[in-house]
Image (spheres, rainbow, N blue to C red):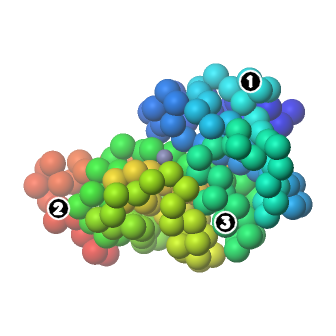
Amino acid sequence: MLLSQFQTIGRELSSRGLVTSHSGNMSVRFGERMVITRRGSMLGCLTEQDLVETGITRNDRMTPLASSELPVHRAIYQYTGAQAILHAHPPHATAISLIEQEIVPRDEWYEVIGRVPVLGWGLNLKPGCLDSTVAEELKERHVVMLYGHGSFAIGQLLEEALSFTTVLEEASKVLCLLKSLGSGNLPQA
Ligand SMILES: [Zn+2]
């Protein structure tokens, strides 16, 4: 049951071009434990061996197998009410993150995700970094971007986190189209 949820979301991310073959990660919380995708797993074709259960505050023998973004997932679960987390590499949002310090949708999606901050702006970000900064921002919102890297979205379910991720990417695509049409100065709404 849990595996099929991960597989469904992984396939969606992969088929929508929101991750590369071996990037992205996701997790679901169970009290003080979580199930997270394995380090280096392929989200488009997950198997039982790609799901790793480990602690939110405690390490165990499975911890080294978890995604390299584990510190960020742990911080988010410690500081927010999230029950599920999804990290993706949406290309249009990533492009905007390289030139703007926040992503401000110009379309209907502003009502859903509001202004999305770009964290770590100008820095050379390594996996697992900015954990407390990402968690702090996600107390107030559903999704954030990391400079030149990707998104972290939260929800009560993986599907909800996926929805915020696709909304961010679609809004970003519209912003890029507006810019290509000459009507943008990427706006500060
Ligand atoms: Zn990443």
Q: Which amino acid does label 2 sit on?
A: Gly
Estimate the spatial distance between the alpha carbons at disc 1 and disc 3, rounded to whole Å: 25 Å
Instruction: Describe the element under mark 3 as helix, strand or loop.
Output: helix
> Which numbered disc, 1 or 2, marks the residue that appears first in the sequence?
1
Q: Position of residue 169 (x, y in %)?
A: 42, 49
Label 1: which residue? Answer: 47
Please state which of residues 134 and 170 is positioned toward the viewer in this rendering.
134
Quadrant position of the N terminus in the picture: top right
The picture places residue 15, in percent across and down from the top left corner, at: 51, 27
Q: From the Cβ of disc 3, is ligand 1 less than 8 Å away?
A: no
Callout 2–callout 3 Cβ contact below 8 Å: no
Q: Quadrant of the C terminus?
A: bottom left
Identify which residue, 139 or 181, lies in the foreground: 139
Q: Earlier in the sequence, mark 1 or mark 3?
A: 1
- Give yes or no for contact between labels 1 and 3 (Cβ–Cβ under 8 Å): no
- Mark 2 Cα-neighbour bin, 10 Å: few <14, some 14–19, many ≥20: few
For residue 76, the mark is 3
For marks 2 and 3, give the CA distance. Answer: 34 Å
Judged by depth in the image, the label closer to the viewer, 2 or 3, is 3
- Res 184 label: 2
* Dot 3 amino acid type: Ile
